Image (spheres, rainbow, N blue to C red):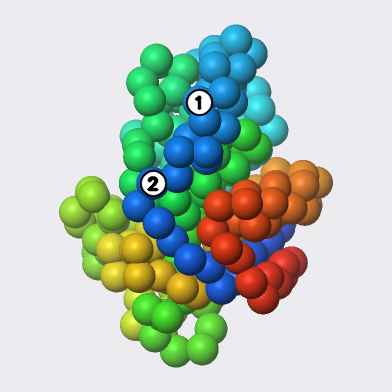
Amino acid sequence: MEEIRNACPQFAGMAVVATVKNTPYCEALWKKIDEFTALYRETYTTDSIKEMATIRATREAYKKCGKDPSRYRPSGEALCRRILRGLPLYQIDTLVDLINLVSIRYGYSIGGFDSDKFEGDTLTLGIGKAGEPYEGIGRGELNIEGMPVYRDAIGGVGTPTSDHERTKLSLETTHLLTIINGYSGREGLKEAADYMVELLKEFASVEDVQLIEF
C-alpha cells in the first residue's frame, strides 16, 4: 500500500464482502442497465467523461505510477466510453453485470473476485513490476508494469484495467469480494458501495454483507 500512497496520497478504497448466488442472466437487472445506459448517453460525451472526478483521478494515478491511461484504459472509463460509442455493455453473468452498472454510474474501476480462489489470507496493493506475469480476463498476458495491482500470496489478482483469470467470478461463485478504487479520495465511495449492496440484495440473494474501508 505504501507504493500507492506515495504516488497517490488521496487514494481510498472500499471493499464489499458478501455471500451471494450468481445466475447467468437477470432480465430485471438488464432492464435497469438499459434504462441507465439511455440516460447516460443523454448526459455525457466521450469528451465530458474525462472531467468526471473518479475517471480523471484514475487516469492521473496511472500516470503517477508509470502507465499510459490512453493505451491501457482503466475499466471504469473503458465501460463508459463503450456505451457512449453506442455499443451495448457486455453481458457476462449477474454478478459481473451489476458490478459494471455500479462502475459506469460512478466512474470507478471496480475489482470483482471469487474470494475462495485467493491464495493466502490477505491482499496487498502495490505497483506492477517489469515482466510480472499477469493474465487479464479475456485479454491474455497483460503488461502490468506501472499499474496499481492487488496481489495475493502468489501474485497479481486485480488491476484497474483488468482482473486476473485465476480469481475471476463464475456461476459457481458464492463468496464475493468487490473493491471500489477511489483514486479521487473517499468522497463518493460509500454511496457507490451502498448502491452495490442494493443491487446484490435485489439480484444476487446476498447474505452476510460487510463494508470495509481502507
Instruction: Report which residue position mark 2 lands on.
Output: 25
> Mark 2 or mark 1, which is nearer the start of the sequence?
2
Q: Mark 1 points at which residue?
A: 34
Q: Which of marks 1 and 2 is in front?
A: 2
Question: Could you tell me which quadrant the N terminus lies in?
Answer: bottom right
Coordinates of residue 112 in the picture (x, y in percent): 47, 59
Secondary structure of residue under mark 2:
loop
Q: Who's the residue at 29% across and 70% down the image?
A: 166
Could you classify mark 2 by the number of other residues whose Cα lies within 10 Å: few (under 14), some (14-19), or many (20 or more)? some
Q: x%, y% of residue 56?
A: 61, 33
Q: In the current view of this chain or complex, which residue is farthest to the front?
A: 27
- Examine the rendered structure and indicate whether residue 28 appears above or below residue 159: above
Dots 1, 2 in contact, CB < 8 A: no
Along the horizontal axis of the image, is 68 left or right of 136? right
Q: Which residue is drawn at 39% across and 15% down?
A: 86
Name of the residue lying farthest toward the right = 187
Q: Nearer the viewer, residue 181 or 206?
A: 206
Q: In which quarter of the image is residue 179?
A: bottom right
**Residue 7 relative to residue 123: left or right:** right
189 with respect to 2 (left or right): right
- Name the amino acid, label 1: Asp
Q: Where is residue 55 in the image (x, y as percent from the top left)?
A: 59, 35
